Amino acid sequence: MLACTLAAALLAGCGLTVHQRAALLDFNRAATEFSSATANEFQYTRNDVIKLNIYRDQLGDASLDPDRMDGNFSPDRLKIRLDAMAALQSYADLLQNLVNGSQQEELQSASDLLVTNLRKVKGVSLSDNQAGAIAKAVASVGGLWVEHKRKQATCEVVKQADAPIKSLLAIVAREFRLDSSTNWVAGYRTTAITLIGRAAFLENRDTNVPLTSLANLREARAYARTVTNRIDIVSPNIISAAHSLRAAQNRLHSALTSADIGTADITAFAAQVDDFVMLYKAITTK
Amino acid sequence: MKKKLGANALQTLEDIVALMAVTHDPDRLDELEDLRVKLTRQISLLVDQSLDEESKAYKKAVAGLQAASTTIEQAIKGLEAVAEAINTAAQAVELVAKVAAMA
């Protein structure tokens, strides 16, 4: 009993605070939503490129490689990006399980079993009050130990994941920058822009083009313009969400290593990611 | 040098396409079309190289995240072990009770 009281006193206050738990859950919700929306965008852009290239093929575009209708977005390249988003999501889910998972019921039933078996021992006599107190003490010390270990593990994991998460978010941000001609989004925009060019050539070069062909190339050009307009809105928002998640990761790291640092920022950064996901869903629903 | 070239390539393609939209002279259009085809192919090659480089960076980041996820799985198992330890103690006490009853 004395050992239990001593252990309880030593471990008291060693677990995650309510605010730290809330910050971790906010961070993980944001990471999950970000990874899901970004994975969707990688898949969406590839599907769009195939559609744009079908138009280019119909318009006889000489710059199209007919063996690569998915352009720069091969299945292997797409898979690597989807795997990366899945890894981020898996990390977020596991971290949530670590923070949220409760062993309280298991601890209580294990403690009850211990007391029940203790009562069967010859010569041991326990009143209901004594039995209840022992079960409660065993469960609470077990619970404090669990909370202590939970915090230790969470701090270690957040520290360990810090560099890979920041690196991953930086790559996503690079791939969606609109001022590059060589990234993922450049592959997407090039396909749309060159289609607009091919349509303009056919429309202006041959004044006797049949009306049906004219309708087709105008439809193709209209679709290509929709593509560039959409990605011009989506790209800066993905980058902004990646920056918010990176800032949240920074604060999370600090909040877990120092009780003096507030967790309100993490909630605010997570809310920015939520805003992006809402906007993304609104403009990407076909 | 390659990066600088790439940075301007897409903007140049946009300029060529904008010019094509307002050009009606057949010879001039043919020249612009030729440029569009060449530049599109060139950008595609640059994008291919860049995406492969980024793919390597993704793989490295994923390996780091997977290591962190493995640590979490081990930690969760460690937490579950506390209840298991109490259960083991309870089974030991039951065994003691049985032995004592036989005596």
Image (cartoon, rainbow, N blue to C red):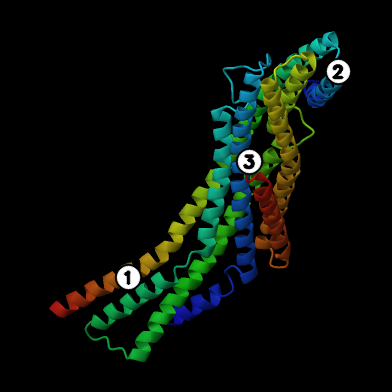
**Left of A33 or right of it: where is A124?**
left
The spot of residue A208 in percent (x, y) is 75, 14
Kindly identify the amino acid type of the residue bearing the numbered disc 3: Glu
Do the CB atoms of the residues marked 2 and 3 lie less than 8 Å apart?
no
Residue position marked by numbered label 2 in the rendering: B23
Residue A249 visible to an observer of this rendering: no
Q: Which residue is mark 1?
A: B89
Q: Secondary structure at mark 2?
A: loop
Q: CA distance from mark 1 to mark 3?
A: 53 Å
Q: Element at badge 3?
A: helix
Say which of B103 and B76 sits in front: B76
* Image quarter (top left, top right, bottom left or bottom right) of the N terminus of chain B: top right
Residue under label 3, please give it. A41
Above or below, A125 relative to A222: below
Is label 2 on the same chain as label 1?
yes
Say if residue A229 shows up in the picture.
yes
The answer for how far apart the CA atoms under marks 2 and 1 are is 87 Å
Q: CA distance from mark 2 to mark 3?
A: 35 Å
Which picture quadrant has residue A274? bottom right
The spot of residue A215 in percent (x, y) is 69, 26
Image quadrant in which you'd find residue A22: bottom right
Considering every residue shown, the one lying at the far left of the view is B102
**x, y percentage for residue A269?**
72, 57
| Relative height, residue B57 to residue B75 (above, below) | above
